[in-house]
Every structure is written in structure tokens, then in C-alpha cells.
Amino acid sequence: MVHRANQIALYFAVYPHDEAVAGVLDHLKKFWERRMRDQIVNYVAHGGQGLHELALEAVKRLQ
Amino acid sequence: MALIQEIDYGTPQRIAETLVTLEIDGKPVTVPRGTSVMRAAVEAGISVPKLCATDNMQAFGSCRLCLVEIEGRRGTPASCTTLAEPGMKVRTQTPRIAKLRRGVMELYISDHPLDCLTCAANGDCELQDMAGAVGLREVRYGYDGANHLKAPKDESNPYFTFEASKCIVCSRCVRACEEVQGTFALTIEGRGFASKVASGPTNFLESECVSCGACVQACPTATLMDKTVIAQGQPEHSVVTTCAYCGVGCSFKAEMQGSEVVRMMPYKDGKANHGHSCVKGRFAWGYTTHKDRILKPMIRAKITDPWREVSWEEAINHAASEFKRIQAKYGRDSIGGITSSRCTNEETFLVQKMIRAGFGNNNVDTCARVCHSPTGYGLKTTFGTSAGTQDFDSVDAADVIMVIGANPTDAHPVFASHMKQRLREGARLIVVDPRRIDLVKSPHVKADYHLPLKPGTNVAIINALAHVVVTEGLVNEPYVRERCDMQAFEQWRKFVAEERNSPEAVEASTGVPAADVRGAARLYATGGNGAIYYGLGVTEHSQGSTMVMGMANLAMATGNLGKNGVGVNPLRGQNNVQGSCDMGSFPHEFPGYRHVSDDSTRKLFEDSWQVGLQNEPGLRISNMLDAACDGTFKGIYIQGEDILQSDPNTKHVTAGLAAMECVVVQDLFLNETASYAHVFFPGSSFLEKDGTFTNAERRLSRVRKAIAPMAGMADWEITQALSNALGYPMNYTHPSEIMDEIARLTPTFTGVSFDKIDQLGSIQWPCNAKAPEGTPVMHVGGFVRGKGRFMITEFIPTDERTTGRFPLILTTGRILTQYNVGAQTARTQNNVWHPEDILEIHALDAENRGIREGDRVSLVSRAGETTLHAHISERMQPGVVYTTFHHGFTGANVVTTEFEDWATGCPEYKVTAVQVSLARKMSEWQEQYLETRKQTTQIQHGQILTGAAGD
């Protein structure tokens, strides 16, 4: 899950910060099933260790 | 129903703006300039005798039967090699011509066996027909002199014979192999009386012949003959249908005797194949009646129990009650299903409908997940629609063809033949592939550039190509300004122009000389119409979607979109990958690629289906398996897929399936996935189906039922019965009604119906009010999304890295004679060519490991280990090994990992770090596999227990 989220973040990382966070967030909303989103939200709630900063920021906006 | 006999016009159709009018036997006829007199005659309804001429190859002028007289000209020219001219007056029947023709026929027959009554071609022999047409009544020359009547018969090919004694040396087979197929396996050996057709030093089986069937189809006698026709006799009726193999989607005539197929003949009117075929579609259909077919529904409580045959009613009610029980216990989202690219659009639509409306969730996915899902993402993001841009015929107008990560001669052979025709005409070729595939150099085809990149560096290469285009001033600026989003373009231009994306900067990581990259980029950008064709070597990477967008960027920057001869063209792996995606098989999309969160689209479906639908994406296949291992996903309905063999990391797939409480498999055979199933619904082969397939060029073609479903229920009827048992009513009476519903609900399909497809032959979507007869080329005048969108494509190396422990890279794929998981082809005589998966390895890597040709070797990765035999291959580059996944026992996917495309989850099959070493015995996984298959595939037939089907 962390690896998947980071891969998405790495793709968008080349874009300006706000655009990149929006890209990651949009991707998670469009393609991740609720269980997966709940898992990563929960993971971030417990620190989100190892998550790319863009993924971390996007997941926080998922909550 | 009758046997369809297509008209043979003798020479190919010519397309020209100028028309010429001539007179043949007193009848005026107007034809395009360049048309032969023979063809003009046929178009006027006049048949000219012929033997060496046929309309899918150029005129040859050797048989001397098609002689005509032309007013004002001396002699009797051959009508096949004489072009129609304005005012020409031609006579096809005169006493002089008749005498000449009879003389020619007499000579042919003087060296031909007179066994017509017992000959396999009796009823379908052009030689016999011509003897009749010219009025041959006697042969003055006996058999006393030298003749070929005792020439040996070659029966080495599993599908056809070569009976040299019946050969008239017309060269049609040789020319078919050259002009139609492009293999050049046949030749005429010797001269004069000694001349004969030769397939190589020994026989057909050991020759370069690829068994496409073009020579057999071309033969005007019984010399080259299908073994099935020899065994069964001539067919009496035909059913036009669509092949069930690759994404080319060839049209075939299933030629029948009653309810038995005699042979499959490629259909000349098929717009994808124009009468050509490959070994799979033409010959490998015997699986449809193979003894392994399961013809009765079966259930069992545990996977270690023997299967118990039950009635359809019991099987369907059992599956429905299990799914309902699971949902009651674990929640609505605890079940899901998988659609198949080997099933029709109608069947696929119905499965996703049942899941969304009957299961009440969006947990539906399809096998495109593991092949072309990045195509959908990448092309939709950049162009606005998830499909290839051209029709196959567009290649005829291509000047530069770039093949990236595809091996068309093996995986899409009929299109490869078409492409090779264009290459022989002079189109230039760029191949981007780690392997030296056949297209790089084969008879009369040679790539201008082969960029043999290291696996996993696609994006670096596409960026380097784009870098050259941008920095050398090769961008088609007016096109970009008119057609594309300029802000996104400028962002992209700045990115690719950075020095780190230059061919020189990436040379070390890609392994491709910078000069070759520069040369290839210049050729693509300046060589005229540039067309990109690509396959799974693009998509099955951690950056698969990025690469698709990278190719789209390159095509937009050079203006190679929106007209004939250009485009970005995915070569789809299976026959209905495009269709299964179109039909809403992905968990986030309704049919027509509309997101489930879109309120207006969802309301459209809710109103039509009379049920509330989820507005959240469901689980992908890999996510379903993850959730199963986590204990939240407990039941699955799998139509026509074998995820245990085809999907990556077999151990994980096994764990997921084993954790489920109800696995329902609908298939022809007890496939690998069925080892973990609790309910088995016997499915139907393509010969038993009514419906449509959509090929790689968005072409909907009809699949027509040649025989009744052998298990008693059609696949769509099974899904409908299951839905009804679940409590969501469906009451279709024919698949055409399903297509009518698809058309009602999908804007790109509103003009599609079975009647219209029957009328037009096939239709390429979009087909609607704007394009009532379909759309061969997309994005003409503007992109579907409005302005084309350049996307930044940063190269991010895969996390799958080689190490001292795993120093080689494994890449997987397929070969000509086998197909996908082998469910079909491995149950045919195609096994003669490929009885097992083998490991291709470069000589240097083999030598370093003490491996010799044919040795059993261990192939081990971080995920698992298997063993197979080694083949030392010049196609490989050092450090890269290759195998296929066609045979269950090999278990190639035991070795592949779960790394996947960042956007779509498509597995990274093309890059697995491995080690290869000599092996003395099979791997532990293979031992377990044999034991598991033995345990899980027993069937209780009444009181009799039988062993595993298919093993």
C-alpha cells in the first residue's frame, strides 16, 4: 500500500507542488477502493512512516 | 445456409482516380486505371479461365490459360498481366483461344494423377474446374514418358499435406508465402521439367514455414490440402465468424459438415485480415471439441473434494446462495468478479452489470488489468479516449513505422504480414525492443534502427527521442499550436529539453548508443507519416502508463495523429481486450469509460437498470486478492480467465484464492484457477457463441454460432441465470438485445446493432449520429478531449533491481504457436512446435553458468523458483533472459513479482531480477503443483472417480 502510494506520488512529483498533491489525491479518489483508502488513512493517522511527502499530504486531504 | 464461395477476381483491386472504359465480349466495363483485363472481365461478370492467378497476389502470367484476343493487337496476351486501357476491345472466347487453352490443359493433365473421384479436392479443385471450362475431352500424351506421379508426399506438418505428384508448379503457394505472408519459406527449385516447389532441405515441418495456411488456401489443386478435409471431405455450409485468438480479430468462414467443423478459412471480406490467417486461427481450433472439455456443471464443498456433477439449476442456485451467504456474513463488498477478453462484448457487459446491479458493488475487473490497462489510462489522459487511433489499413500509408515493445510476427501475425508488405514497399522501420525480434531482420525486411534497450528503461528512451525532436527543431509547431493544450506543451517541452533527457545522458542506463537514438528520432519526425505500434513491452512495466503517455507526447509533437498512416496503435493481446474494456469491466468505469462517480452517468444506468449503484471505485484483481488474504473478500465469479496461471506472483494468487469461501469458475476446461474453485460452470467456445468481438482497431465484428453450446447453456445465459438466482432479474432472449442496451447507454455505440454490423460487415466505434458508419481514424480535426494534453514523463527506474544474487533480468511474453495460458493452443497440435515453455538465454550468460542447449535450469527470483529447459538464443542480449507462460507446469509467474504500473496496477512482467543455474530436478513449487492438480481436479461421474482433466 505504501509502495503503491509512493509510486503515484513519484509520478506527480515532477509537477508543481499543489498540482502534484491534487494529482495524487485525484488518483486515490478515482482508483482506490474504500478499504484501501481507509487503510492508508489509518496508516497516516498512525504516523504514515515511509510515505512520500506528496502522498502524505494527499492522504490527509482524503480524511 | 450454403457454402460461401467468394469471387476470385484474379488480380488485386487497384485504386486510382482515373477510370478507364473498355469493352469485353461486347460488354462495356469501367475500372480504375491499372486494373488487369482479367479483373475487368470478372467485374463485368465474365469469367476467364485461370490457374496461376488469384486476387490476393500480383499477376504472374505463367499458366497461359487466361489468354485473350485484343482488337488491333497481335497474339494472345495473358489477361492477368495485361492492363485495361481506354477503348480496348477484348474477346475472351474465340476458337483460336479455345484451342490454345485446351492444348495447355492437356499438357497439365498429362502429368497429373487421374484420381479425381477419390481426390480430397474433389468438389473444390480449380484444375478440375478449368479442365471442364476449356472443354478438355482427351489427353493424347500417355504416362509412359517422364512424369512426377510418384513424387513423395510430405505429411510432416500436423495440419496439411504436400502431395507433390499433384503439383502443377503454378507458384501460387510460393507467391502466397512471399507476398501475402512475407515469410519466403517456399521456392521453386530446379528448372524446366525438374522444377518443383521446395520448402527447404527436408520437409515443411522443419522449414521456415509458419503454417499460416496461405499456401494451402492458394493451391488450385490437392497438392496442399488440409488434413481435416482429407479425413472428412468437403464442407457443405459456412458460418462467418471472428477468430478467438489475438487482437487482430480475423474474420473466418467456419466451413461445416452439419454440426462439425471441417476447416476454418480466412474470409476475404474481413476488414482486419483481408483473407489472411495465422497458424492459430486457421488450424488451432481442435480444442473446441477436445476430450478435456467439461460439459456438466459441478460443485464441491472443499477444493480437496472430488467435483460432483449436478444440474444447471443446482449449480446456479448453489453459487447464488453462497454469494448471498457471504454477503450477509461479510458485507456487500466481500464478493466480486472478473470478465474475460476471450468472451464477447455482450457476455462481458452482462457480467459487469450483474456485479454492479446484482452484487451491488463495483468489484469487477478484467484481464486487461494485466496487459493493456496502461493503454486505457495513457491514451485517455492525453487524447481523451482509451483506444488506438487507426485502422489496420492505415499502415499502407505509413512512411516510418516504429514498433515498440511488440513482436507482431509472433503475437499478431496477420497484421505483421500486412506491415511487412508495407515495409517491402519501402516504408522505414524503427524497432525498440530488448530482443532482436524477427522484424529487426527477416527476408526483405531490415530495421533502419534497432534500439535494444535494457528492460525497464522505456521511458528514458521515449524521453530521449522527444529530446531530439524538441532540441533539434523538429516539433510540428503549427500542429501543436492548433491541436494541443499549449500550457501543458510548454511544460513538457521544457522538461524533455533538459540535458538529463538527452540520448547521451541516458545511454548508460538504456544501453542504446546515443547516435542511434538521434537517428531514429530524426527519421520518425521527418520521414513522412510516422506510425507507432506497440505491445505489452510498453505496458507491463512499473511505468507502463507513463510510457504510453510518452509515446502520445511524441506523436502529438510531430503531428502524427488524426490522419491516415500515423497514430499510436496498441496491438491488443487477446481478441476482445478492447471490447472488454469498452464494456465497463474496470472497477472505476461504466461502459464507455465513464467514471462511476459521475452522477449523470450513474443516473442513466440506475434508471435503465432500476437499481441503485455505488459511486465509488471497486477492487482491482490484485486488490481483490489482497483483500482475500486480509479476510474481507470471500467470493468471486470468474468468467473465462485463468488468473492462477496468467497473473503475477502465483503464490500470492494461490493464497488469495485459497482464502475465499466461494470461487466460481466458468470456463471450457478445468484450468489452473479451477483447482481452487467450488463451483464450475462449463462455458462455450467461440464456435458456440452469438455476439461481437472488438479488435485492436476498435472494430466490432460478429461472432456467429456455428454449433450449439456443448454444455447446453450459452455463457450469457449462465450469467443471466446466476443474476436471476441472486434476485436481480434479467430476461434477455438473444445477445442482440444486450447490444441494443449497450447502444442505448453508451454514446460511442449508439449507432451499433447486430443488424447494422451484418449490413456493413463490421463497425469501428465511435458509431453514432456523428459517424453513422463508424470511425476508422480517430482525432481527425481535433482530439476527443478537445486539446491534446502533453504529460510530463519523468523516468523513474523500477524498484526491481538486479543484484549479485539475482543478476539477470527476466522478461516474459508469448510465441507464435501458443496463446496466453495455453488453454486453447496447448490442446491442439501446435504443441508440435512448442510442447513446453523454454528459457531463452544469451550464449555468454549460458557459458558463465555451464549451461548447454537443452539443459534443465532453475529460474529463481525473489518471488519463487521454477525449472525449465534452456535455449541458447542470439535474439537475447547478455544479462536478459526470456520465457513464455503458456504451460501451467512451468509456472513462469511463480517467478514474476508484484511490482506494478503506478497508475493502473498492470504487473511488471517485463522486468524480474533472476538467477539461472543448472537444475537436476523440478522445483519444489512444481512438485507441489503436480500434487495439488492431482488432488483438486478429480471428478465424480456417478460412482466413477476420474483423474485430472487436462493433465
Image: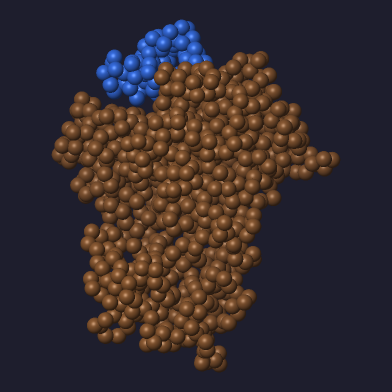
Chain colours: A blue, B brown
Against B745, residue B105 (above or below) is below
In the rendered image, which quarter is residue B943 located in?
top right
Residue B438 shows in this picture? no
If the image is split into quadrants, where does the N terminus of chain B sit? Answer: bottom right
Identified at 30% across, 85% down, the residue is B75
Residue at far right of view: B943
Q: Is residue B107 above or below residue B256?
A: below
Residue B326 makes an appearance in the image: yes
Give the side of residue B559 with respect to residue B762, left or right: left
Residue B69 in the image: state x and y as whole percent. 32, 81
Image x and y of residue B271, in percent: 41, 52
Q: Give residue B946's position: percent from left, percent from top.
A: 78, 43
Which picture quadrant has residue B487? top left
Which one is in front, B889 or B130? B130
Please tell me which residue is depicted at 28% across the width and 77% down the height of the picture: B89
Using the rendered view, name the quadrant where residue B831 is placed: bottom right
Q: Look at the picture and state if B99 lies above or below B928.
A: below
Which residue does the image show at 31% across and 77% down from the upper left? B90
**Depth check, front residue: B312 or B129:** B129
Residue B754 x %, y %: 48, 42
| Of the pair B521 and B384, the residue shown nearer to us | B384
Q: Tell me how many marks there are.
A: 0
- Relative to B582, B553 lies left or right: left
> Going 25% across and 30% down the picture, which residue do you hit?
B787
